[in-house]
Image (cartoon, helix red, strand yellow):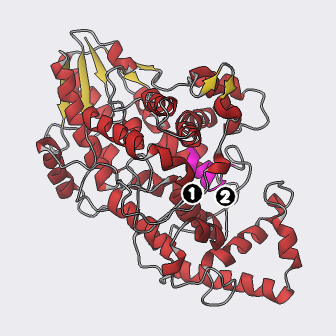
Amino acid sequence: MRLILVLGDQLSPDLSALREARPDDLIVMAEVMSEASYVPHHPQKIAFLFAAMRKFADCLREAGHRVAYATLDDPDNTQSIPGELLRHAAAHGAERVIATRSGEWRLIAALDDLPVPVTQLPDDRFICSQPEFEAWAEGRKELRMEWFYREMRRKTGLLMEGDQPMGGKWNFDHDNRKPAQADLLRIPPPRFEPDAVTAQVLDLVEARFPDSFGRLRPFGYATDRAGALQVLAHFIDHALDEFGPYQDAMLQDDPFLHHSILSPYINAGLLSSMEVCQAAADAHAAGKVRLNSAEGFIRQIIGWREYMRGIYFLEGPDYTARNVLGHDRDLPPVYWGAPTRMNCMAQAVGQTRDHAYAHHIQRLMVTGNFALLAGIDPAQVHEWYLAVYVDAYEWVEAPNVIGMSQFADGGVVGSKPYVSSGNYIAKMSDYCGGCAYKVTQKTGPGACPFNVLYWDFMVRHRDRFQSNPRIGRAYATWDRMDADKRRQIRSDAAAFLDRLDAGDPV
């Protein structure tokens, strides 16, 4: 007999390992402390996965499979994936392990090192296989997502008319950069009352992870495919049409806006990327959703999501250690909820604490932008993002953080660093109106920290970025400034970073 391993983010009946299962094989699933604690995961992320895993195991049993499932509090649980496989191999005389390749190099290596033969099958739930991505990347000087995305549009046929994109353009980003206004009639995503299985998991997580960053309750995520399908239907019917124009907007009293909140379910395997994209394309075809909204949503999935996975495996296990800018500042307490006068950071971190969620612009242009401007160690930034978000797995999180957010890979993912002063946040949010700092003030004690840190970052890295065609023109603005003003900006930035290093409230 053989063991069939199913991991917590592989909750798909058509998983490649499950397709290989024979009647006498034993499916192994386990809640283990080594996976729940290798970074300090948000308690809602742990609860979501444990509850979804338990329900998926029940579905497998109902389908006739033999399943060995270890709960976290099982006294026989070895608390690691390799340990559980070895325990069941010894107990049942299993001669081989069949697994679908994990989305983290760490687990891939751990399974390769098992003293039992392990077959790691490709994870074919993705649109682009890794050999296909490598063939696309070979010989290219720049691995830009836009060009990859066009290939995925052609491959899937989504929003295509023959070999041409609907509407005559591949990308409608120009139409998708509007700030949003507060709207009491905006319908929030559905929330689910915990059932008996989920309630039991919540009690377990509360007892075992009492000191984790993040609020466990109230917990409202769906924890099975039926619930995930409800979230998808709600998004298509009530939010997708206005998702496009307002996808970059931020409002302090509306954490979800028109976002789908589907990434936890797609990344765990409860929904497939193609069924989600097809639902969006069908809604456009039916005249329910504008083209720029359908295109912008589909691009996030068959574009960015698939591209990030390709980059992660293409670049190899050392990718998370890259730090071309030499940033070495420790992650400051504000990321763990310490009081701050910066309202944008308070809002983004507070929302993360409460929901294990923040949308892509909050991650990129608030918490990510601040980390990059302040020179925080990208490895620590990477571990924070991996820990605190319900949808975070290393294959998708690391390229977004190491590459796009922190530019630590030197430009593999992005052609420029995503840095900005406070003006961008003021334009796209209502955060600045309730802030102790003034976004219009460029220097002095009341100036927005993003304003002085932006120029400090640019000056520190002038040798690298002054010839960059997308960002280099900013140096002409710096050079035209009065010398006293330039000195004041650098002095204010140094004073702010000194307070950050000392752990003082900022």
Whole-percent x, y for residue 448 in the image: 61, 80
Answer left or right for 452 relative to 241.
Answer: right
Find residue 309 and report its image quarter: top right
Q: Secondary structure at mark 2?
A: loop
Characterize the local packing of mark 1: few (<14), some (14-19) or many (20 or more) Cα atoms within 10 angstroms.
many
Answer left or right for 35 relative to 410.
Answer: left
Whole-percent x, y for residue 440 in the image: 65, 82
Among the two numbered marks 2 and 1 on one chain, the one whose residue lies closer to the N terminus: 1
> Farthest left residue?
196
The vertical placement of 450 against 266, above or below, is below
Whole-percent x, y for residue 137 in the image: 70, 29
Is mark 2 in CB contact (under 8 Å) with mark 1? yes
Let me know if residue 339 appears in the view. yes
The vertical placement of 263 against 40, above or below, is above
Q: Secondary structure at mark 1?
A: helix
Q: Which mark is residue 443?
A: none
**Residue nearest the observer in this picture, 240 or 330:** 240
**Residue nearest the observer in this picture, 271 or 58:** 271
Q: Amino acid at mark 1?
A: Leu
- Residue to which mark 2 is pinned: 418
Whole-percent x, y for residue 93 in the image: 22, 15
Characterize the local packing of mark 2: few (<14), some (14-19) or many (20 or more) Cα atoms within 10 angstroms.
some
Answer left or right for 391 relative to 411.
Answer: left
Residue at left offset 64%, top offset 50%: 175
**Residue nearest the observer in this picture, 459 or 162:** 162
Query: Magenta stretch mostly in which secondary structure?
Result: helix
Residue at left offset 24%, top offset 30%: 56
Find residue 168 and report its image quarter: top right
Residue at left offset 14%, top offset 44%: 195
Quadrant the N terminus occupies: top left
- Residue to which mark 1 is pinned: 364
Magenta range is 399-409
